[in-house]
Structures are given as C-alpha cells and as structure tokens.
Image: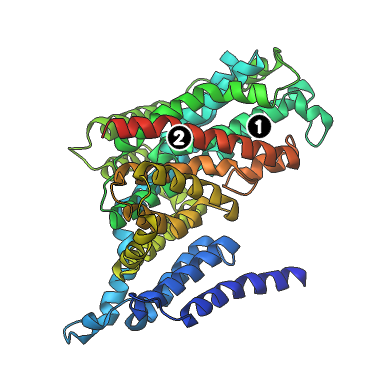
Amino acid sequence: MASIATYRWTAFLPIVVTLLIALFPTPSGLEQHAWYFFAIFAGTIAALVMESFPFAATGLMGATIVTVLAPWVLFGTQELANPKFKAPEQAIKWMLTGWSSTTVWLVFSAFTFALGYEKSGLGRRIALILVKLMGRRTLLLGYAVMLSDALVAPFTSSNTARSGGIVFPIVRNLPPLYDSKPNDPSARKIGGYVMWVAFATTGVTSSMFLTALAPNLLCVEIIKKIAKVDISWTDWFFAAAPFGIAMLLLLPLLVYWIYPPEIKEGDAVPKWAASELEKMGKITLNEILLAIIVFTAILFWILGAKIINATTVALVAVSFMMLFKIVKWDDIAGNKTAWNTIVLLAFLVSMAEGLSRTGFIHWFDNGIAAYMQGFSPIVAMYVLVATYFFSHYMFASTTPHATAMMPVMLAVGMSVPGMPIKEFALLLAMTHGIMGVITPYATGPAPLYYGAGYITGKDFWKLGFIFGVIFITALLGLSAPVMLAMR
C-alpha cells in the first residue's frame, strides 16, 4: 500500500506544478500561451525529477500534451489569425522536430558503439590488459582503472553502460583478491580506493568528451537552438582538455591521498587479470574489426569535420559493425536503455525548442538583464556556472537538470553585456559529467558504486562534496582561462 501511495503522490505532483504555474497571473511582457507552455514544461521536469513515470514516457507525454493543446500553449495570436495556418499539422511537426536532430542519432550510434565493445569483448580485454600491466601497486592499479574508462569514453554516450557495464564488473572482482570485503571494515584495504577511482573517473571522462554522456549532446542542441552557437566534437574536446587531462592524471593520486587504501601493493590482481585473459583466448577477428572501425571514426571526427558530419561518420561506422556482424540488428533493437534514452532526448529537444519558439526565453532574457547590469561578465560567468553545478544536489539525473536549467542559465548569461557566450555555454555544458560525482543518485553509475558496499554512506557524501569542489575548481581554474585567452 505504501508503494501505491508513493506512486500516486509522485504522479500527482507534476499535475499540481503545472496547474499552479498556469493559474498564476501571466508575467508582464509575456504572452499567455508562452506562460502556459512553461507550465507544461515545468510539470514535465517535475515528473522527470520525481521519476513519476519512465523517463521516455514522461518526455512523450509532455510533448503530446503540448501538441493537443497547441492552439492555447504553442502558437501566438498572429499565427492563429492567419487563415492559411493549420495548427494541428504544425503542432505535430513541432512535436517530431527532435527526431530530425543529428544529436539524437549520434546518441543512437554511440549506444551501438558501446554494444559493440560489449559483444566483441574488446572493452573487457582492454581493461584486463591494463590491470595485468599496472596492477601490482595499488596506485598504478588506480591508473589502470582510470585508463579503462578513458579509452572507451569517447565512444559511449551512456556513462552507465561504460562505467557500469564494462569497468564496474571488472573492478568489483579486484577487492576480494586482497580479502577486502563489502560492508565490512576490510573494505578500506583496497575496495574503497578502486571503487572511488572508477566512479570519479567516469565523471571526468563524461565531461571531457562530447560523446561520453548523453546530456552533453542534448546541451549542444539546446545551445544551438537558444544561443545560436554551434559546438563541434573538437570544440568541446579542446575546451575540456586543460581540466580533463589534468584531472585524469591526478585523480588516482588525489584519491590515494584523500581516501588512502590500506594495502599499497601485491601480486594477486595482475595474476587474476592474466588468468582472465587466458580464458578469453587470443584476440578475435571481431575485436580487430571493431578497433579498426573505431579508430577510423575518431580520425574522421577529428580531421574530417569539414568533409562529413559527425553523425554521418557514426552511422557509417554502425553500418559497418552490422555488415561484419559485430552487432546484429536484433541486438540494437533489443537495447532498451538506448531506445529509452533516444526517445527521451528527441522529445526533450522539442520541448526545449518550444521555450524559444513561444518567446519565453526572449522574455526571460529581457527580464533578467536589468538585474545583471553592473556585473563583470567574467565574474557573472563563474558565479552562474558554479551555481548551475551545485544545484545538481536537487536532481537525480543529469538529463532533467540539463532540460530544466540549461535554457534558463543560457538566457541569464546572454543578458549580461560582454558575456563570452560560446565559452559560457561550453562551461555550463561541461559540468554535466563532473556533477555526477556529488551524490549517490546524481548519475546512472552512482547507485552501482554506492550499493557495492565498499564505501560507506557517510564517506560517499563526503567524497562527493570534496571531489565536486575539486572538479568545478579545476574546470573554472584551468579550462576557462585557456578558452578566454584563445577567443
């Protein structure tokens, strides 16, 4: 009965949010339909935050409600007064605009890449080789765990698939070799160290590469629609590199100092990795083919941006993966997580675009500008990015956070005279990976590492805050100055 009551409460809350906002007097300077659209948008975000329904279903329902009520929430009086304007047809076209987004299909391709790593065994082999070579000393083992994530991050837009599906299954086999047990004082022997390195690493890699986290791609689309700024894969990487490379190089050492393992060295881990590699046997043809496909895709993403679109490159790579039967269509069709994410992204892209289409963003921009007068644009940029980052304590996922706050924060930044918009937008977008470290529910892999039992609840929250501060400081202290100097 309690679960039923909770379900009803979480399902009812988004409706209450929508109605309360809709019944509130429309702010001066904003058209009625734009205010109603914002009310539905806010209700949709509330449903995502509360997890009232599956994420994909929430996105679908929010966009559908807008489409049904389009004459009152999506279109202005001038459009409706035009006798040639057909509201029902235009509404459904608006609803499906997200499906034409290159971002959505890049996410589809990235999920298929992750599936290829899993099906071929290449991801597991890479991690085991690193552990075999670097696992004798605990600190070097930390670097091996870090590299295991970093090497596959550019091709896996789901950090849950990457960290939870490839890295975590290997990492959880390491502590028992040293008699380090979960939910036990012995967890600190080595288990807590390797678990936190693995978890924190996926935060850095998710921010370092555009294609390493689905909300990154959503943010790029939002930035394009609202700020009219195009951000390429290389734009993102070179902006993130100063902070990302520094953090990856320092992370295992920082964890070694801040949350030190009791065991500093041993031979058990590399021996175990060697035995697992023997069980896998020689590298297979599928692994070789996948490595060639991935390497070729990277070259085109980095060097061929002016010749071929990044999404086209990814779809060609997926086609070759199916041609060589590295993955089968049935595998792709059965990837529930991938399709749920794609459906959600497609409809959230439409919803975010609706804020701009109805004039809400323009109104907010004009309204907030008066309050930002007199602030230095650089100071305003730093304060807004830090505020955006720490507000993630209120969210259980990075996707709702991006959908709810990214358009608003962009509008605020655009209202500040002299604000370097592209740099500001990039900094906002790049926080989504590193913000996942701050709580046990902040991102997909978090519950896996929290539930493993090697890090106590108190330690998890403490480490989340400490490394959250370290990460946002590194982003603003290393990447931001470089970006501004290269303008």
Image location (x, y in percent) of residue 467: 59, 34
Mark yes or no: residue 236 visible.
yes
Dot 2 crowding, Cα within 10 Å, few <14, some 14–19, many 20+: many
**Residue found at the far right of this picture:** 185
Disc 2 to disc 1, C-alpha distance? 23 Å
Image location (x, y in percent) of residue 97: 30, 64
Q: Amino acid at mark 2?
A: Leu
Image quadrant holding the N terminus, namely bottom right
Image quadrant holding the C terminus, namely top left
Please give the residue where the numbered disc 1 appears in the rendered image: 195
- Which residue shows up at 24% across the image and 84% down it? 80
Q: Callout 2: helix, strand or loop?
A: helix
* Earlier residue among tags 2 and 1: 1
Image location (x, y in percent) of residue 411: 35, 57
Q: Are marks 2 and 1 in contact (CB under 8 Å)?
A: no
Using residue 7 as the reference point, say whether residue 304 is left or right of it.
Answer: left
- Which residue shows up at 70% across the image and 13% down it? 265
Dot 1 crowding, Cα within 10 Å, few <14, some 14–19, many 20+: many
Please give the residue where the numbered disc 2 appears in the rendered image: 475
Image location (x, y in percent) of residue 295: 34, 28
Q: Is residue 336 above or below residue 310?
A: below
Q: In terms of image quadrants, where is residue 377? A: top left
